[in-house]
Amino acid sequence: MAKAQDINTVLKDIMGAFPVDTKAMEDAFKNQAALNEKLSGVALTAAEQSAEISNKWTKETLAKLNDMTKAKAEPADYAKAMTDFASASAEVAAENMAAFAEVAKKVQMETVELLMAAGKDLQDDAAKAVKKATDDVTAAAKKATATK
């Protein structure tokens, strides 16, 4: 009667023939964490700059409203104050929208630069991992062939 093969031994032999490089996984995790840190830094800087622009815009608008609400000597002065406020508000809005656009442009450029650098690093790492895996499998195949 033939002896039954132990499945655990078979699986162990198979897994041993195809080693897993845990260092590559650790490096990939570290690289991903570093990329996330840099991307978060870009986003937080943009949020801070946007908050500063909004705060400045609000202060300027309130100051102009304060000027507009002061008592006037003539009824026509109220119309002029409203017109001046509307004109100044439109000008400030254009300036602040341009400032927001600059922040967005900077975020876009920094994000693209980070992702391109990460892609290059990932491509280099993948090439090294494939070469190492190929070498390991070749060595394992030679070893398996030699023992038969």
Image: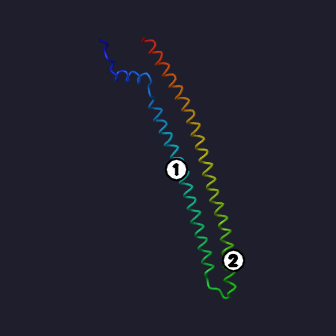
Q: Residue at the location (55% across, 52% down)?
A: 43
Q: What is the distance, in whole Å, between disc 1 and disc 2 at their CAs?
A: 43 Å
Question: Which of labels 1 and 2 is toward the front?
Answer: 2
Query: Which residue is the extreme one toward the left?
Result: 1
Q: Is residue 119 above or below residue 59?
A: above
- Of 14 and 26, the residue lying toward us: 14
Q: Residue at the location (52% across, 50% down)?
A: 40
Q: Position of residue 22 (x, y in %)?
A: 44, 31
Residue flagged by tag 1: what amino acid is it?
Ser
Q: Residue at the location (44% across, 25% down)?
A: 19
Q: Position of residue 72 (x, y in %)?
A: 65, 86
- The C terminus is located in which quarter? top left
Q: Position of residue 61 (x, y in %)?
A: 61, 72
Mark sitting on residue 83: 2
Task: Tell whether 2 sits left or right of 46.
Answer: left
Q: Residue at the location (41% across, 22% down)?
A: 14
Mark sitting on residue 40: 1
Q: On the image, which quarter does residue 89 sit in?
A: bottom right
Q: Is residue 39 above or below residue 99?
A: above
